[in-house]
Amino acid sequence: MASVEPVGAADVTFDHECDVLVVGFGAAGAAAAQEAAAAGADVLVLERSSGPGGTSAQSGGELYLGGGTEVQKACGFDDTPDDMFAFLKAALGPHADEEKLRLYCDGSVEHFEWFRACGVPFKPTLFEKPGWMPYTEDGLMWLGENAWPYNTIAKPAPRGHRPATTMFAGGILMEKLIGAATAAGAVAHQDTVATNLVVEDGRVVGVVARKFSDRVVYRARRGVVLTTGGFVDNEDMLADHAPILLGHDKVSDGTSDGSGIKIATAAGAATRRMASVEIALTANPAVICRGMLVDGLGQRFINEDVYPGLFSHKAVQHRTGPFWAIIDEAGYEDIDEADMWGVRPVHAGETATELAESLGLPPGALEATIETYNRHAEQGEDPYFHKDAKWLRPLKGPFAAIDPRDGFFGAGRMGAGTGAGGFTLGGLHTTVDGEVLNNSGERITGLYAAGRTASGIHGEGYISGTSLGDGTFFGRRAGRKAAGG
Ligand SMILES: Cc1cc2nc3c(=O)[nH]c(=O)nc-3n(C[C@H](O)[C@H](O)[C@H](O)COP(=O)(O)OP(=O)(O)OC[C@H]3O[C@@H](n4cnc5c(N)ncnc54)[C@H](O)[C@@H]3O)c2cc1C
């Protein structure tokens, strides 16, 4: 295993010099580079791949923003930073970082305007349906704000902002952010992987990197900003810190190997919330909102209209699988073809008993779940889990079941085949300005981090758009602070 230990400045010869060296050209890196360059710093960005973008470019491109953005106003929503804070504190908790969260919510309208200034297009229309991401170009979507218990905690407003394209919008997002960083003057060195920090008198002053078989050393006069992504692609780190993700699919571009976290901890950096993860069950919210999600005992365990990441967390972390999305004929026919994501039910039955036998569920279990659900749905209520009345309707045979392990996009069983995948949320312990702290809570001078390399606003929960959201928000702050020296 190659050493990740820091190298003394006296032991290296510098090949390149800049004010601010950003390591990793994903969303957090692009945001840091743009701000540092706009503040007048001479900025270099190291990127291990042959092109920029990282996982961010492959993502859905959803950005969790609110507090009264122009898109929210155009769609008729009167949102406030306080409501956004109350929702996120509950949904990202327990143990969301309240200091970071407060800044994130208070600065959200300005952050939205920064995306617009970078050229990211947003269509001022609302996608009203439940889903992981819209198949339309709508610029705004609900992410569970209108579901119980969150609708009792904060005034509901949709806050999922999306660049104007159908389905995955990360490509457009990154094209614009990379363009903005480059236009501000940041220069990228690609195929260049950072392997160690360079230190001098207790300060981080640069990075040792490898470009193919060459060693290249960079001096950073004002600061190094680590934005190398998380560690879902590093099995050893997962085993040590976030074993819940072991065996599941990797929600990443394959470069999230924790390298930034490792070279920083080798130089004395502290970490935070390393066990926090995002985990997504590939269950289709369009199906389960109209039907139900049951576990391996045929039991419901959550209101199915909640943000899909939260039903996924509950399933994978607290219940026994396999999980089944159950739907009846009327519900199935109500779903737009595009909203099925190419998935088809592989189990069906005229009655609940026939379906349960096909699924191998304990005798009587699914029947009891459906009978109870229907009895309450007839009254327009769900006293167990508080699913919204608009999704409540007695389910009548014939029934079908969709297996999350069948994946999305009609691709059939792929990857790990567990029906779940995720990424890490924990990382380096930073201040609100991205300054990396050591285990004594002191700043490591010259070292900054953002994006999934750092621990951001998240506690134990996750809502779509908060990874790109907090990565760019705190990436910008880290870039500005580093440029200030
Ligand atoms: C399919 C999919 C959908 C998603 N949808 C959403 C969504 O809609 N909204 C949302 O908020 N999040 C979403 N996510 C999660 C989100 O994309 C990531 O959490 C986020 O992009 C991380 O951003 P980052 O800048 O920290 O890292 P990245 O975007 O991964 O960037 C890190 C960069 O650093 C480079 N790098 C790594 N190590 C080194 C090194 N040692 N030296 C030099 N370079 C290095 C990598 O090559 C990469 O380019 C999704 C992810 C996937 C895969």
Image (tube, grey):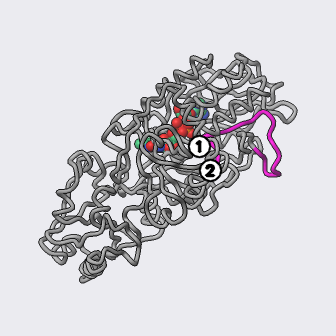
Q: Quadrant of the N terminus?
A: top right
Reply yes or no: does residue 452 show up in magenta: yes
Residue carrying label 1: 470
The amino acid type found where label 1 is placed reads: Asp
Of the numbered discs in the image, which one, if any, rests on residue 130? Answer: none
The magenta stretch is 437-456
Residue 240 visible within the image: no
Q: Secondary structure at mark 1?
A: helix
As drawn, 462 above or below 435: below
Q: Position of residue 55 (x, y in %)?
A: 48, 37
Q: Residue at x 20, y 59 (%)?
A: 332
* Residue at screen point 27% across, 45% down: 409
> Considering the numbered disc 2 on the image, is that residue within a helix, a strand or a loop?
loop
The residue wearing badge 2 is: 457
Taking the spot 71% from the left edge, 36% from the top edge, the residue there is 448
Q: Position of residue 7 (x, y in %)?
A: 76, 32
Q: Earlier in the sequence, mark 2 or mark 1?
A: 2
Position above or below: 337 against 179: below
Asked where in the image residue 321 lies, by quadrant, the reply is bottom left
The answer to whether mark 2 and mark 1 are in CB contact below 8 A is: yes
Q: Is residue 94 above or below residue 143?
A: below
In front of the other: 456 or 406? 456
